[in-house]
Amino acid sequence: MTTTAKTSRRGPRRALTGDEILEAALSLLDEGGPAAASIRGIAAKVGVAPNAVYTYFPDKAAVVQAVVEHLLGQVNHAIAADENLPWTQRIEHLALDLRERLSAHPGAVSLMIGGPMDGANALALNERLMEILVDSGLHPPDAARASYLLIVYVFGSIALEVAELGEARQARPEADRISERRAGFSAIPAGRYPLSAAAASTMAAYVSTEQYVWGLHRVLAGIGGPPNPAGPPPHR
Amino acid sequence: MTTTAKTSRRGPRRALTGDEILEAALSLLDEGGPAAASIRGIAAKVGVAPNAVYTYFPDKAAVVQAVVEHLLGQVNHAIAADENLPWTQRIEHLALDLRERLSAHPGAVSLMIGGPMDGANALALNERLMEILVDSGLHPPDAARASYLLIVYVFGSIALEVAELGEARQARPEADRISERRAGFSAIPAGRYPLSAAAASTMAAYVSTEQYVWGLHRVLAGIGGPPNPAGPPPHR
DNA sequence: AGAAGTTGCTGTACGATGTACAAATACTGT
DNA sequence: ACAGTATTTGTACATCGTACAGCAACTTCT
């Protein structure tokens, strides 16, 4: 959602656009991680004095928020528009697209967790989720809870991945994309944590996308399933 | 897990303990949020020069990590020890206890998201989860995935709550505990997002703990349920 | 007991950060 | 042309993490 340039202002022409700042911030975020996305760095990248940024954004927090909104605005809502698909698939398409967009910019993800996500695009995402859930037959109150649960899962999943991948991102640029998950668990003292250690090797085989959709399927099944989980033990 | 004091060292007596630093950091975190938990602030609180902290921790990141570990170490594992309880309840007890411990220190929660959680206590938590899941009949690989899903849900949930509550924490100290969730959604433009707006009022009624266990029940049901969610639409 | 060796705290200092303030500049409407 | 206003810049300040060197305290060895 690009801001329409208002012609015929009073002072000198603006040397920048808000979007230029956002793009600079995003590229800095990608190259050097969250630490590199400083106001001064951004300003240097677009070729202005550090303070010039404050003409477009009141805060650094505002810049961060705008970057996050920018990313959330990139998700392809149409991917979940087909009402003939089962609701679970529509949500899965949305969740996968969102994950793809976000994990392309891990630095931005770690920033996203700091502040609240109450921007227009975040709301639109929530709205789309609720549409699908209500379409599927859920009453709005339950749809609201379910959409919140889905949001928690999707963002929590991505955030945890980025956090586990850690600062290795900027140290080893070849691991820019999320691919080698559970790396932190590969050095588990086997004596103290036998189960975790035994699972670590197999966990390493599950690339993150698999685990992501596995968990998503679980959550979706839980939303569609019976309300009380106290019943039978899991099978398989 | 307090570090045992090693007697008879070479130099002058240590004026501090690592735990003193951790407690100071935690109290600063509680009072003034993440911004207040600076090395210099911590040092001032315990009455030493800023650099003295680096005798005990190599980094600020190490201090943060230790604080997180300290909090994770406080969860009461015994609460889920009773093997006669249904597995879902054992996990629920654990999840509720964890949530209580963490949401008592929102500032620490927002710090926790930045780095990976690969400390001993985090591992112990994962191990406990896997124990319960394996006890319930799940095969270890599935238990590993399920425990990861649960961890994602629990921490994502808490992190999102803290983030939505936002920096209001330190501005209005009476809202120290997490209680007024979804506050950010109370000002939704009703025209553009009808479903979200309609749900916002009812959402406000669901205090966070309710939503938390609701979602947890969903996740647990999904873990115990059939593997493929593509089937029937949700009922109720 | 004295000397030597080691350790911990402090003082000082540097670079970097976010951002407030005032001056300078470039444009528009009258 | 002039006045007014919006934007950028220069400078400045407080604060941050932390590196370096010195001093002081304590243990160990002779």
Image (cartoon, coloured by chain):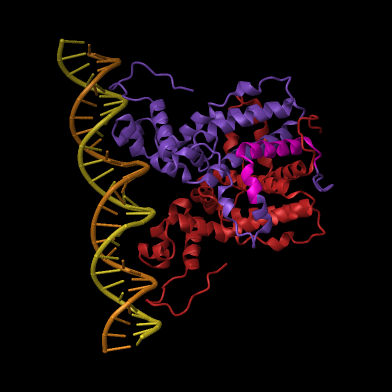
Chain colours: A red, B purple, C yellow, D orange
The x and y percentages for residue A169 are 52, 49
Res A233 → quadrant:
top right
The x and y percentages for residue A150 are 68, 47
The residue lying toward the viewer, choosing from A224 and B199, is B199
Q: What segment is highlighted magenta in the picture?
A: B200-227
Q: Residue at x 77, y 49 (%)?
A: A138
A1 is higher (above) or lower (below) than B178? below
* B52 relative to B212 in the view: left or right: left
* A236 relative to A170 in the view: left or right: right
Q: Residue at x 79, y 37 (%)?
A: B225
B103 is higher (above) or lower (below) than B194? above
Q: Magenta stretch mostly in which secondary structure?
A: helix
Q: Does the magenta stretch include residue A87?
A: no
Q: Residue at x 39, y 31 (%)?
A: B24
Q: Is residue A188 visible?
A: no
Image quarter hosting the C terminus of chain A:
top right
Q: Is residue A199 visible?
A: yes
Q: Does the magenta stretch include residue B209?
A: yes
Q: Which residue is drawn at 50% across and 47% down?
A: A114
Residue extending furthest right?
Answer: B232
The residue lying toward the viewer, choosing from A82 and A197, is A82
Image quarter hosting the N terminus of chain A:
bottom right
The residue lying toward the viewer, choosing from B226 and A145, is A145
The x and y percentages for residue B19 are 41, 26
* B17 relative to A168 in the view: left or right: left
